[in-house]
Image (cartoon, grey):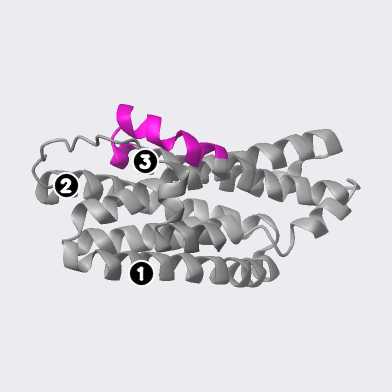
Protein backbone atom coordinates (compact mmCIF):
# COMPACT_ATOMS: atom_id res chain seq x y z
CA UNK A 1 0.00 0.00 0.00
CA UNK A 2 1.44 3.37 -1.02
CA UNK A 3 0.65 5.08 2.28
CA UNK A 4 2.85 2.55 4.13
CA UNK A 5 5.71 3.30 1.70
CA UNK A 6 5.19 7.00 2.38
CA UNK A 7 5.39 6.42 6.13
CA UNK A 8 8.52 4.29 5.61
CA UNK A 9 10.27 7.14 3.75
CA UNK A 10 9.20 9.59 6.45
CA UNK A 11 10.51 7.26 9.18
CA UNK A 12 13.86 6.91 7.41
CA UNK A 13 14.22 10.67 7.01
CA UNK A 14 13.21 11.37 10.60
CA UNK A 15 15.68 8.89 12.11
CA UNK A 16 18.49 9.90 9.76
CA UNK A 17 17.97 13.55 10.75
CA UNK A 18 18.12 12.68 14.45
CA UNK A 19 21.43 10.79 14.01
CA UNK A 20 23.02 13.29 11.62
CA UNK A 21 24.66 15.40 14.32
CA UNK A 22 26.43 12.60 16.20
CA UNK A 23 29.89 12.22 14.57
CA UNK A 24 31.09 15.80 14.17
CA UNK A 25 29.16 18.02 16.61
CA UNK A 26 31.80 17.49 19.36
CA UNK A 27 34.46 18.80 16.96
CA UNK A 28 32.53 22.03 16.41
CA UNK A 29 31.99 22.38 20.18
CA UNK A 30 35.77 22.14 20.70
CA UNK A 31 36.41 24.61 17.87
CA UNK A 32 34.05 27.15 19.48
CA UNK A 33 35.87 26.83 22.80
CA UNK A 34 32.83 25.47 24.65
CA UNK A 35 33.34 22.95 27.47
CA UNK A 36 33.00 19.43 26.03
CA UNK A 37 30.83 18.35 28.97
CA UNK A 38 27.91 20.19 27.34
CA UNK A 39 28.02 17.88 24.30
CA UNK A 40 26.25 15.08 26.13
CA UNK A 41 23.63 17.42 27.55
CA UNK A 42 22.89 18.89 24.12
CA UNK A 43 22.51 15.52 22.40
CA UNK A 44 20.63 14.08 25.40
CA UNK A 45 18.09 16.92 25.36
CA UNK A 46 16.74 15.40 22.13
CA UNK A 47 15.79 12.17 23.91
CA UNK A 48 14.34 13.98 26.93
CA UNK A 49 12.04 16.07 24.73
CA UNK A 50 11.12 12.96 22.74
CA UNK A 51 10.01 11.17 25.92
CA UNK A 52 8.02 14.15 27.19
CA UNK A 53 6.33 14.62 23.81
CA UNK A 54 5.48 10.91 23.58
CA UNK A 55 3.82 11.08 26.99
CA UNK A 56 1.65 13.97 25.77
CA UNK A 57 0.61 12.27 22.52
CA UNK A 58 -2.56 10.74 23.92
CA UNK A 59 -3.90 14.22 24.69
CA UNK A 60 -2.62 15.66 21.40
CA UNK A 61 -4.23 12.93 19.29
CA UNK A 62 -7.59 13.66 20.91
CA UNK A 63 -7.39 17.29 19.75
CA UNK A 64 -5.49 17.05 16.44
CA UNK A 65 -5.46 14.56 13.59
CA UNK A 66 -2.48 12.22 13.34
CA UNK A 67 -1.73 13.57 9.88
CA UNK A 68 -1.52 17.13 11.24
CA UNK A 69 0.84 16.00 14.02
CA UNK A 70 3.12 14.28 11.49
CA UNK A 71 3.36 17.43 9.36
CA UNK A 72 4.04 19.49 12.51
CA UNK A 73 6.83 17.02 13.40
CA UNK A 74 8.39 17.43 9.94
CA UNK A 75 8.23 21.22 10.30
CA UNK A 76 10.07 21.05 13.65
CA UNK A 77 12.77 18.84 12.15
CA UNK A 78 13.25 21.31 9.31
CA UNK A 79 13.69 24.03 11.95
CA UNK A 80 16.29 21.83 13.64
CA UNK A 81 18.22 21.44 10.38
CA UNK A 82 18.22 25.21 9.76
CA UNK A 83 19.43 25.90 13.32
CA UNK A 84 22.24 23.34 13.06
CA UNK A 85 23.29 24.67 9.66
CA UNK A 86 23.68 28.14 11.17
CA UNK A 87 25.83 27.04 14.14
CA UNK A 88 29.21 27.73 12.48
CA UNK A 89 28.14 31.36 12.06
CA UNK A 90 27.70 31.85 15.82
CA UNK A 91 30.63 33.53 17.56
CA UNK A 92 29.71 33.55 21.28
CA UNK A 93 29.70 30.32 23.27
CA UNK A 94 26.46 31.03 25.14
CA UNK A 95 24.52 31.73 21.94
CA UNK A 96 26.05 28.63 20.36
CA UNK A 97 24.91 26.48 23.29
CA UNK A 98 21.42 28.01 23.36
CA UNK A 99 20.90 27.40 19.64
CA UNK A 100 22.27 23.85 19.97
CA UNK A 101 19.84 23.07 22.79
CA UNK A 102 16.90 24.61 20.91
CA UNK A 103 17.71 22.62 17.76
CA UNK A 104 17.82 19.32 19.65
CA UNK A 105 14.66 20.12 21.59
CA UNK A 106 12.85 20.89 18.33
CA UNK A 107 14.09 17.58 16.92
CA UNK A 108 13.01 15.65 20.02
CA UNK A 109 9.48 17.06 19.95
CA UNK A 110 9.30 16.59 16.18
CA UNK A 111 10.45 12.97 16.44
CA UNK A 112 7.89 12.31 19.18
CA UNK A 113 5.08 13.69 17.01
CA UNK A 114 6.18 11.61 14.03
CA UNK A 115 7.02 8.31 15.74
CA UNK A 116 3.85 7.92 17.80
CA UNK A 117 1.60 9.16 15.00
CA UNK A 118 3.18 6.93 12.36
CA UNK A 119 2.61 3.75 14.41
CA UNK A 120 -1.02 4.76 14.91
CA UNK A 121 -1.38 5.45 11.18
CA UNK A 122 0.19 2.11 10.22
CA UNK A 123 -2.32 0.28 12.42
CA UNK A 124 -5.16 2.41 11.07
CA UNK A 125 -4.38 1.89 7.38
CA UNK A 126 -3.23 -1.75 7.48
CA UNK A 127 -5.38 -4.82 7.16
CA UNK A 128 -5.28 -6.90 10.32
CA UNK A 129 -3.23 -9.65 8.67
CA UNK A 130 -0.69 -7.10 7.35
CA UNK A 131 -0.18 -5.08 10.54
CA UNK A 132 2.82 -7.04 11.86
CA UNK A 133 4.54 -6.96 8.45
CA UNK A 134 3.98 -3.23 8.00
CA UNK A 135 5.17 -2.38 11.51
CA UNK A 136 8.25 -4.52 10.82
CA UNK A 137 8.92 -2.49 7.66
CA UNK A 138 8.61 0.77 9.57
CA UNK A 139 10.97 -0.44 12.31
CA UNK A 140 13.46 -1.62 9.68
CA UNK A 141 13.47 1.90 8.21
CA UNK A 142 14.04 3.23 11.74
CA UNK A 143 17.23 1.18 12.03
CA UNK A 144 18.40 2.11 8.54
CA UNK A 145 17.85 5.79 9.30
CA UNK A 146 19.97 5.66 12.46
CA UNK A 147 22.69 3.77 10.57
CA UNK A 148 22.71 6.08 7.55
CA UNK A 149 22.58 9.33 9.58
CA UNK A 150 26.22 9.29 10.77
CA UNK A 151 27.45 7.85 7.44
CA UNK A 152 25.61 10.43 5.35
CA UNK A 153 26.65 13.19 7.73
CA UNK A 154 30.33 12.25 7.66
CA UNK A 155 30.49 12.07 3.86
CA UNK A 156 28.64 15.34 3.30
CA UNK A 157 30.63 17.20 5.98
CA UNK A 158 33.84 16.04 4.32
CA UNK A 159 32.52 17.28 0.98
CA UNK A 160 30.84 20.56 1.90
CA UNK A 161 31.60 21.48 5.52
CA UNK A 162 29.59 21.35 8.75
CA UNK A 163 26.47 23.15 7.46
CA UNK A 164 26.12 21.22 4.20
CA UNK A 165 24.37 18.01 5.44
CA UNK A 166 21.83 19.96 7.48
CA UNK A 167 21.05 22.38 4.67
CA UNK A 168 20.73 19.45 2.25
CA UNK A 169 18.34 17.54 4.50
CA UNK A 170 16.29 20.71 5.09
CA UNK A 171 15.90 21.12 1.32
CA UNK A 172 14.91 17.46 0.89
CA UNK A 173 12.34 17.82 3.68
CA UNK A 174 10.99 21.02 2.11
CA UNK A 175 10.54 19.16 -1.20
CA UNK A 176 8.91 16.14 0.45
CA UNK A 177 6.65 18.01 2.89
CA UNK A 178 3.86 18.89 0.38
CA UNK A 179 3.85 15.31 -0.97
CA UNK A 180 3.70 13.79 2.51
CA UNK A 181 1.05 16.25 3.69
CA UNK A 182 -1.22 15.74 0.67
CA UNK A 183 -0.61 11.97 0.66
CA UNK A 184 -1.52 11.50 4.32
CA UNK A 185 -4.69 13.55 4.08
CA UNK A 186 -5.69 11.70 0.90
CA UNK A 187 -5.08 8.38 2.69
CA UNK A 188 -7.33 9.56 5.51
CA UNK A 189 -10.29 9.85 3.13
CA UNK A 190 -9.38 6.81 1.04
CA UNK A 191 -8.36 4.15 3.56
CA UNK A 192 -9.68 5.17 6.97
CA UNK A 193 -12.00 2.45 8.33
CA UNK A 194 -15.55 3.10 9.41
CA UNK A 195 -15.82 4.10 13.07
CA UNK A 196 -16.72 1.21 15.34
CA UNK A 197 -18.83 1.21 18.45
CA UNK A 198 -16.89 1.98 21.60
CA UNK A 199 -15.83 -0.99 23.70
CA UNK A 200 -16.79 -0.61 27.35
CA UNK A 201 -14.12 -1.98 29.70
CA UNK A 202 -15.64 -2.96 33.01
CA UNK A 203 -12.35 -3.30 34.89
CA UNK A 204 -9.55 -0.71 34.51
CA UNK A 205 -6.27 -2.15 33.20
CA UNK A 206 -3.55 -2.13 35.87
CA UNK A 207 0.24 -2.22 35.52
CA UNK A 208 0.25 -5.87 36.65
CA UNK A 209 -2.21 -6.71 33.85
CA UNK A 210 0.14 -5.11 31.32
CA UNK A 211 3.16 -6.96 32.71
CA UNK A 212 1.34 -10.26 32.11
CA UNK A 213 1.29 -9.49 28.38
CA UNK A 214 4.46 -11.03 26.92
CA UNK A 215 4.92 -8.42 24.18
CA UNK A 216 4.56 -5.54 26.63
CA UNK A 217 7.02 -7.08 29.10
CA UNK A 218 9.57 -7.73 26.33
CA UNK A 219 9.20 -4.16 24.98
CA UNK A 220 9.65 -2.76 28.48
CA UNK A 221 12.76 -4.90 28.98
CA UNK A 222 14.32 -3.84 25.68
Badge number at residue 144: none
Magenta: main secondary structure equals helix
Q: At 72% across and 65% down in the image, what residue appears?
A: 23
Q: Secondary structure at mark 1?
A: helix
- Image quarter where the C terminus lies is bottom right
Q: Could you tell whether 151 is left or right of 133 in the image? A: right
Q: Which residues are magenta?
A: 52-68
Q: Could you tell whether 60 is left or right of 125 in the image? A: right
Q: At 61% across and 60% down in the image, what residue appears?
A: 20
- The residue at which mark 2 appears reads as 186
Dot 3, how many residues are within 10 Å of its Cα: few (below 14), some (14-19), or many (20+)?
Answer: few
- The residue at which mark 3 appears reads as 205
Q: Position of residue 69 (x, y in %)?
A: 37, 38
Instruction: Give me the C-alpha separation between circle 1 and circle 2.
Output: 24 Å
Q: Position of residue 91 (x, y in %)?
A: 83, 39
- The residue at which mark 1 appears reads as 136
Residue 67 on the magenta segment = yes
Q: Could you tell whether 222 is left or right of 59 in the image? A: right
Q: Position of residue 42 (x, y in %)?
A: 73, 45
Dot 1, how many residues are within 10 Å of its Cα: few (below 14), some (14-19), or many (20+)?
Answer: few
Q: Could you tell whether 76 is left or right of 72 in the image? A: right
Instruction: Give me the C-alpha separation between circle 3 and circle 2.
Output: 35 Å
Q: At 38% across and 57% down in the image, what residue appears?
A: 10
Q: At 70% across and 39% down in the image, what residue appears?
A: 101
Amino acid sequence: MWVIRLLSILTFMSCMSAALIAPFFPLLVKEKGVDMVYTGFVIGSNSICFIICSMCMSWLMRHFSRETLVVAGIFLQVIQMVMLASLPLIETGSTFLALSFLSQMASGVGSGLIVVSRVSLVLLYSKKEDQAKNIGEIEMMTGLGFIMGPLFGSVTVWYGGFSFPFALVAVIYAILMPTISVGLHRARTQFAPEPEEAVIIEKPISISDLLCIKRYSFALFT
